[in-house]
Amino acid sequence: MVPVKPLKLAAVALVGALGSGYALQLLDGEDAASRGQTAQMAGPSLARPSPPQAGTEISGALVSLPGREARDIVSGDRIVQTAALDDAPAPGLQFTPPAETDSAAAPDCAMTLSLSPGAAGTITATLTAPCNGGEAVSITHDKLRFDDRMPESGPLTVILPALKVDATVQMSLPGAEAQHAQVTVPEAADYARTVLQWSGTPDFALHAFHGETGFGQPGHVHALNPVDPGAQGAFTLTLGHGGLEQPRLAHVHSVPAASADPVHFAIAAQHNGDTCGRVLQAETFVNAPRATTSVPVTVHMDSCETEASFVMLPVPQPLELAAN
C-alpha cells in the first residue's frame, strides 16, 4: 500500500467585514512554517440578492459556492474520496410569500344609523348597510311601525315625524343586529300627529278635512295631496314601501298645535279585486296627551260583485276626541 500522509482540514476563517469573502485554508500535517508556504484557496463568496419587491417578504440570502476539485481525505486507515463542493446542494433563496390579500375582499359590512332633526318636527334617519342592498328594513319609532327597503347601493334615508321631543328610532334588517339611535327634536312639541297604520297592500288611506272643506276641495289633505294651502301648515307623510311582501305601511297627518281650525278625519279603504270579500284591519292613534292607546279599525269589504271604489269610514270617536 502506498503510504499516505494524514491530512488535516482547518476551520473556515472569516476574514474582514461581511461581503469581503472567506478564506478556506487546507493544511497538511507538517508545520506550515517549515514548508514556507500555505495552501490557500478562495472560499465561498456572499452573493447579495436584489432588493425585495414592495409587499414581499424575503428571508435568508442567496449564497454561491465556487467549484473545487475533489480531494482525498484520510479517515482512519481509509482514503475517502470527497466530491467537489459544486456537487453539494447549496443553500438556496428562501422565499416567504406574503399572506394573500384579495383587493376584492368582502367590504366592511358594518351598519350605522344616524338621526338628525328636520323641518316641521321631523326626523331624518339614515341607515348605512353596505352589504344589505335590496333588503327589507323594519323601522320603529314609539308606536309607529313601518317597513322600507334598502337601495341596491348607498344608504337608506327616511323622513318620519317625531312623536316625541326626545325621539328614539330603531331600524333592523333580517339576521342583523337592530340599530338604535336617539335625537332631540324640539319642534316635535309644536305638532299633533294622527297616525293610520296597517299591514299588507296599500289598502288604506288617511284623509284630513280642515275647516268646513269637502272631498277634493281646498283644505283636503291626503297621501296624493300631502300639502295644501288651505290646511294652514298641516301635511301628511306616507311611510313604508308598498313593493315588499306584506309590508307595514302608515300615513301620518301633522297639524300645528297652534292651529285653531277644526280637523276631521276619515279612513278610505280600497275596494278592488284584491280586497273584495276580505276583512281589512288597521289601527289609528294620535300623540296628543289624552291619547294613550291605539284604536283598532276593522273593515268588512263587500263581495267582488261591487265595482272598484273607496269606502270612506269616519275615524273612531275616541281618536276624534283625543285629536281635538
Image (spheres, helix red, strand yellow):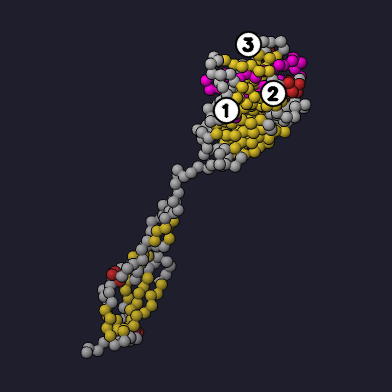
Quarter of the picture containing the N terminus is bottom left
| Residue linked to disc 1 | 200
Q: Amino acid at mark 3?
A: Gly
Residue 225 x/y as whole percent: 61, 16
Residue 86 x/y as whole percent: 29, 69
Front label number (1 vs 2): 1
Disc on the earlier residue, 2 or 3: 2
Residue 264: quadrant of the picture: top right
Residue 178: quadrant of the picture: top right
Q: Is residue 211 above or below residue 151?
A: above
Q: Amino acid at mark 2?
A: Thr
**For this view, does 13 lie left or right of residue 144?**
left
Residue at 67% from the left image edge and 21% from the top image edge: 253
Q: Which residues are magenta?
A: 247-275
Q: In what element is the residue under mark 3?
A: loop
Q: Is residue 128 above or below residue 50?
A: above
- Spatial separation of the CA atoms under disc 2 and disc 3: 20 Å
Confirm whether residue 119 shows in the render: no
Residue at 60% from the left image edge and 28% from the top image edge: 199
Q: Which mark is residue 194?
A: 2
Residue extending farthest to the left is 1
Residue 191 x/y as whole percent: 72, 23
Q: Residues within 10 Å of mark 3 (few under 14, many from 20)?
A: few
